[in-house]
Image: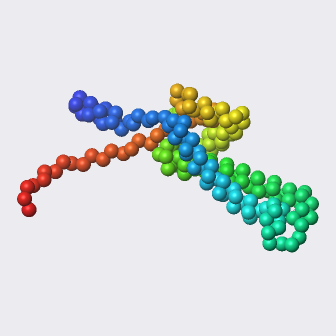
Amino acid sequence: MNSPSGNREDIVRKKREYVTLEFAGFWRRLAAALIDLFALTVISSIIFLIFAPYQWFGFGGFWGTGDVFAEPVWRALPYLVGGNLLSLLVNIAYFVGFWLWKGQTPGKMLLSIKLVRADASDVTISVALLRYLGYIVSGAVLFIGFIWIAFDGRKQGFHDKMAETYVVKIPEATITAPVTKMSMGG
């Protein structure tokens, strides 16, 4: 049978394991979003350079002698649609993939913030897709769903409320080292 003091020590030890998390604020989340936006812009630009024929966007005029607009514009349409669809798929894969993998996009990693569920469970594919859909809703009318983060007590945007998620600051680890005596002399 366990002694009463042993149970109390277990309770104290378990209480120490809990960490109080702080919600990430608007400016930190905006900075993370701008980092992610930059990364996605680079990726999308590469996709368009690969999929869109350069001569339909005026680049051919520098090297060629032909008229840039001699080709009908409708011939560029499949490339534009295909490039946009591929960019959208890359965008969805970027956010949903990182949320599933680590709960963090590269922007969130750099700023030490993380996506968490309200019940502390892992982000599932359905939650991640719902949150991405919430991004569209949040940005649909003048980005009010994102601006709402600045005024919400729990720092949730519309997308967070839809998916029941929070973005929190990652607590810094504290290291406890034993104190050693320093000797005087050599």
Residue 103 appears in the figure: no
Location of the N terminus (image quadrant): top left
Task: Please give the name of the residue rendered at 51% of the width and 35% of the height, measured from the top-left corner.
Answer: 25
Task: Please give the name of the residue rendered at 22% of the width and 31% of the height, measured from the top-left corner.
Answer: 5
> What percent of the width, then of the height, locates residue 151?
56, 28
- In the picture, measured across the screen, residue 9 lies left or right of residue 183, that is right
> What percent of the width, then of the height, locates residue 123?
56, 42
Q: Residue furthest left?
A: 185
In this rendered view, identify the residue nearer to me: 140 or 68.
Answer: 68
> What percent of the width, then of the height, locates residue 57?
81, 60
> What percent of the width, then of the height, locates residue 109?
50, 49
Task: Please give the name of the residue rendered at 54% of the width and 36% of the height, measured from the top-left corner.
Answer: 26
Task: Please give the name of the residue rendered at 52% of the width and 41% of the height, measured from the top-left corner.
Answer: 28
In this rendered view, identify the residue nearer to me: 1 or 128.
Answer: 128
- In the picture, measured across the screen, residue 51 lies left or right of residue 65, that is left
Residue 75 appears in the figure: yes
Label count reads 0
Which image quadrant for residue 135? Answer: top right
Say how the picture is coloured: rainbow
Location of the C terminus (image quadrant): bottom left
In this rendered view, identify the residue nearer to me: 16 or 72.
Answer: 72
